[in-house]
């Protein structure tokens, strides 16, 4: 079995493009998915007619409703269930007895396949190879524990998605130890440089500690009529 480490967004995009073009059947399981309503480059890689099963997470209402509605119409979608946060990132393609898979950090989002720092492994081999059998088993578990959604659920989720918390844009701290010259200083001078950095004040409005995600935006596990309870 061949393994390739994917370290850049470009490498992830190229590997996904090759996998989805090559495969006759595709299965996905990931925490989040976006598409810019079908216009994003990574979404255009996905041949919907080849999809067999897709399991998508909706934690923190980050997955785009358009994606869920599109996949639901195909009859290939379940929303990630089970205990805890649904957090896998698995793309599996098969063609006869051959298989390829991307497993790692990349969600099916424009950022993951366009600009993020991601790290994944591309596997290529026979479907009978043990790693592929284990991946198929994982997909089956995700599918069997997933939730089948309906229109009321989608309407409730869409409302929550429109109110979802957006990632803050934080100013950057310029550290004093930032050039090779800093490493050439004598030890007393270098130590003083570090001490000065420790006492430096961040830009106005910026804290050195990242605040926790508000508890109120953690998805409730209470379901009524197949629709989740989202924060108001």
Image (cartoon, rainbow, N blue to C red):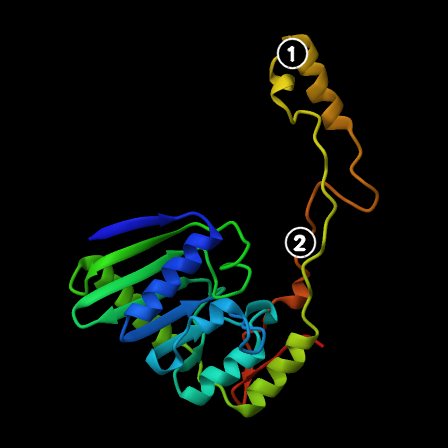
Q: Give the number of marks.
A: 2
Q: Residue at x 65, y 67 (%)?
A: 217
Label ID, residue 212? 2
Image quadrant assignment for residue 30: bottom left
Q: Work out whether 10 lies above or below 223.
A: above
Q: Nearer the viewer, residue 196 or 183?
A: 183
Q: Work out whether 9 lies above or below 61.
A: above
Q: Work out whether 71 lies above or below 110.
A: below
Furthest residue to the right? 204
Give the distance between the C-alpha atoms of the residues marked 2 and 1, in whole angstroms. 38 Å
Q: Which residue is mark 1?
A: 185
Q: Residue at x 66, y 54 (%)?
A: 212
Report whether residue 73 is seen. yes
Question: Residue 8's spot in the image, x, y percent?
Answer: 46, 49
Q: Nearer the viewer, mark 2 or mark 1?
A: 1
Question: Residue 231's spot in the image, x, y percent?
Answer: 68, 75
């Amino acid at each position: 079995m061949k393994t390739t480490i994917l370290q850049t967004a470009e490498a992830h995009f190229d590997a996904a493009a090759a996998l989805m073009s090559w495969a006759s059947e595709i299965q996905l399981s990931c925490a989040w998915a976006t598409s810019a309503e079908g216009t994003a480059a990574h979404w255009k890689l996905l041949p919907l007619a080849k999809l067999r099963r897709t399991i998508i997470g909706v934690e923190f209402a980050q997955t785009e409703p358009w994606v869920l509605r599109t996949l639901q119409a195909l009859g290939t979608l379940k929303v990630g269930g089970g205990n805890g946060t649904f957090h896998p990132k698995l793309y599996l393609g098969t063609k006869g007895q051959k298989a390829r898979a991307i497993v790692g950090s990349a969600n099916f989002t424009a950022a993951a396949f366009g600009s993020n720092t991601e790290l994944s492994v591309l596997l290529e081999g026979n479907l009978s190879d043990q790693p592929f059998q284990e991946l198929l088993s994982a997909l089956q578990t995700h599918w069997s524990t997933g939730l089948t959604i309906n229109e009321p659920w989608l309407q409730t989720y869409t409302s929550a998605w429109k109110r979802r918390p957006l990632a803050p844009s934080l100013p950057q701290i310029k550290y004093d130890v930032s050039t090779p010259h800093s490493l050439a200083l004598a030890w007393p001078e270098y130590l003083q440089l570090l001490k000065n950095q420790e006492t430096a004040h961040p830009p106005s409005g910026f804290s050195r500690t990242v605040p926790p995600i508000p508890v109120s935006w953690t998805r409730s596990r209470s379901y009524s009529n197949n629709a989740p309870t989202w924060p108001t």
